[in-house]
Amino acid sequence: RRAAEAGRDPAKILIFNLQTVILGETDALAKAKFEEYKSYVSYEGAMALISGWTGIDFSQFKPDQALENVPTNAIKSAVETFSSADPDTLWTPNALADWVGIGGFGPLFVGGPETVADLLEEWVEETGVDGFNLAYAVTHETFIDAVELLVPELQKRGVYKKEYTKGTLREKLFGEGPRLADGHPGAAWRNLGELNRGRQKERA
């Protein structure tokens, strides 16, 4: 709606969601891997990370202190953000550390190839998201698992390419030419030289 109000074609604006996936050959193996990853999460590191993101010094709170009871607007705003991800969670610094320790603020899927593929397709169907930007939990294991386990399952379902197509990224995403369409707001800035000369004449 907002895109249309701004004169843009909503179909020409693609949304890619941040997504972390923990994969295993089976759901049980994926969950075991997730638990192993969690054992390496640093509470202090997670608190430093989220303090940097929010501008709130979380070291001032006790690990099990309920953040919703802290009388500051900054905390209230942050808790509203956390609550939108999981409204049933009582948010404490410990809970935040568990959440951002793997995957950051993005959604986290844990499971075998079929389970994760089901979840990704469900997101596409329910939200209309155009794709996913996969974040890593462990370099390079996360991406190896995605290539070896998830991609074949998605290809089997016909929702992931089996070969690369020629052209620029813009052509691959939109199926059009390599440059911005004439109706795109950015197209007005193609010839900066002429724009600058026009502005100079106006000032004169």
Image: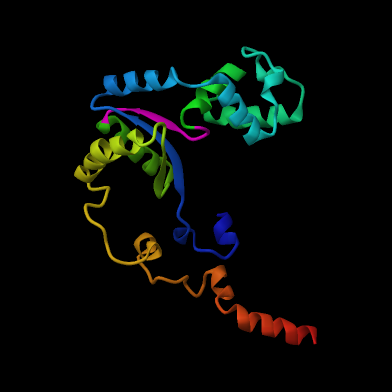
Tell me what residue is drawn at x 38 percent, y 72 percent: 177
Q: Farthest residue toward the right? A: 204
View extreme (left): residue: 156
Task: Please state which of residues 70 and 2 is positioned toward the viewer in this rendering.
Answer: 70
Q: What is the magenta range?
A: 104-112
Q: Is residue 114 above or below residue 124?
A: above
The picture quadrant where one finds residue 116 is: top left
Q: Is residue 167 magenta?
A: no
In the rendered image, residue 136, in percent from the top left (x then y), is placed at 41, 36
Q: Tell which of 133 and 142 is nearer to you.
A: 142
Please, is residue 144 above or below residue 58 in the view? Answer: below
Query: Residue 181 location, x and y as percent?
Result: 47, 72
109 inside magenta stretch:
yes
Count the labels in the image: 0
Q: Quadrant of the C terminus?
A: bottom right
Q: Is residue 171 left or right of residue 183?
A: left
Quarter of the image with the N terminus in it: bottom right
Please indicate whether residue 190 sits to the left or right of residue 134 in the image: right
183 left or right, relative to 26: right
Q: Is residue 130 above or below residue 121?
A: below
Q: What residue is drawn where x is 64% and y is 27%?
A: 79
Q: Is residue 46 left or right of residue 65?
A: left
Q: Position of residue 193 (x, y in %)?
A: 62, 81
Residue at image x 27%, y 21%?
29
